[in-house]
Amino acid sequence: MIGIRDIRVLDPANGRDDKRNLLIAEGKIVSADAKLEDMKDARILDGAGLIAAPGFVDVHVHFRDPGLTYKEDIETGAKAAARGGFTTVVCMANTRPAVDNPETLSYILEKGKKTGIHVRSCACVTKGMQGRELTDMEALRRLGAAGFTDDGIPILDQALLQKAMEEAARLGVPISLHEEDPAFIENNGINQGKVSAELGIGGSPDRAEIDLVERDCLLAQEIGAKVNIQHISAAGAVEAVRRAKARGANVTAEVTPHHFTLTEEAVLTFGTCAKMNPPLRTEADRRALIEGLKDGTIDMIATDHAPHSQEEKGRPLTEAPSGIIGLETALALGITELVKPGYLTLMELMEKMSRNPALLYGFEYPGIVPGAPADLVIFDENESWTVEDFSSKAVNSPFRGRTLQGKVRYTICDGKIVYESEKEDVR
């Protein structure tokens, strides 16, 4: 048993924001008003000054397993997730082999069961992520695919995407889309603008993203599909989603912490650790992303945790792979960049990091009430810490060395403590 004494509970599912004494046993929350004084067999955590919220849900991670486990594997990815306060993650399908077959999907789900957190996975929309032939979406869904995506590669064939949306709608699952049209891109990973011009490398214009977002929002509305726009980065794309929602389309959008924190200027400071797809864009784009979070156009924060080896990231800018890790800094960036400046309340941040991501995939989300699964994050919103080491195999982060506010102290999944920081509050 675990008791948590005198802790502030933030529960978006039930609109709760108050002090509670929580008791956890057999994987469930037994009581939110527990008498903990005589609990001789329970481990009692002192929650004074801390916050308990439903465990975070990340709908966009790359654990590189199978096939690229020198970058990350399911075990190390799950450890990074737990350290960041995430109790559920959804893996992307661009592994080697890709998740376009029952064997690879089963491998990921079975290995994920041994990690201590909930590891789910999407399956591919198209075979081999080649954009030519649909996978057997019904069979993969029946086996446990959370949804479908060819993340990393846009689906350019509109007729094929329409069929995929129709099938996803029939199955009642979302289809998540990477929106970058390569026809407009000279060098991916860097915004086409003043920084790319200074570096002489062409870059990726916002039009590459906006055009596909507009197309796919219209398709979603026509078909009635549930469509998620992945890692949105451009102001025009935010506006396209806003208009689609106003028309009644079943469209959601996710944004990464690095996109609402950094701009294209970061490439000049951090080099390849500021290279990602879609790229960091302008300050105007960054502010549009924050506005989208504020008004609900952007539903959720997802890390797009993308580990790479130091050797790979050490290559020249145009040759290095895109992407950065993000699970272990997501909460702190949300607090530092969104809550402390007053853009979002803590409750709104919890909605973007747990409730809304869970709703996208229809995951159970009863909140912090008796009988609910004991999946919790406990954190100190005011604790300052410097980003130094990682539980991930990778270290490709532009936030190394930066001091942030907001520290995960414990992560509890299925009633078990799967992460605790060195600084403890224990009876």
Image (tube, helix red, strand yellow):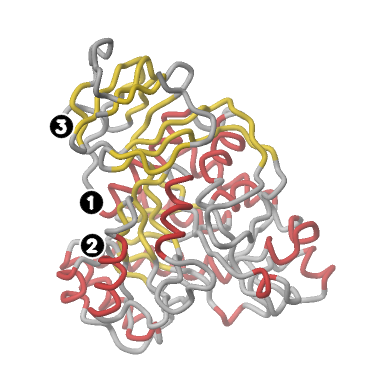
Where disc 1 sits, the SS reads loop
Image x and y of residue 232, in percent: 51, 58
- For image coordinates 68% across by 80% down, the residue present is 186
Query: Which residue of the protein is positioned furthest toward the front in this rendering?
Result: 40
Point out which mark residue 73 bears: none
Point out which mark residue 362 bears: 1
The foreground one among 213 and 60 is 60
Answer above or below: position of 317 versus 239: below
Question: Crowdedness of circle 1 by 10 Å Cα count: few (<14), some, many (20+)?
Answer: few
The foreground one among 41 and 34 is 41
Q: State the residue position of label 3.
A: 371
**Amino acid on which disc 1 is placed:** Gly
Q: Judge from the rendering whether residue 91 lies leftward or rightward of residue 206; answer left or right.
A: left
Q: Earlier in the sequence, mark 2 or mark 3?
A: 2
Where disc 3 sits, the SS reads loop
The foreground one among 186 and 398 is 398
**Amino acid on which disc 2 is placed:** Val
Point out which mark residue 173 bears: 2
Image x and y of residue 188, in percent: 64, 74
Please identify the quadrant where the C terminus is shown. Answer: top left
Q: Judge from the rendering whether residue 330 lies leftward or rightward of residue 405; answer left or right.
A: left
Answer above or below: position of 130 versus 72: below
Q: Earlier in the sequence, mark 3 or mark 1?
A: 1
Question: Crowdedness of circle 3 by 10 Å Cα count: few (<14), some, many (20+)?
Answer: some
Give me the C-alpha separation between circle 3 and circle 1: 19 Å
Nearer the viewer's eye, disc 3 or disc 1?
A: 3
Contact between marks 1 and 2 (CB within 8 A): the answer is yes
The foreground one among 400 and 2 is 2
Where disc 2 sits, the SS reads loop
Nearer the viewer's eye, disc 2 or disc 3?
A: 3
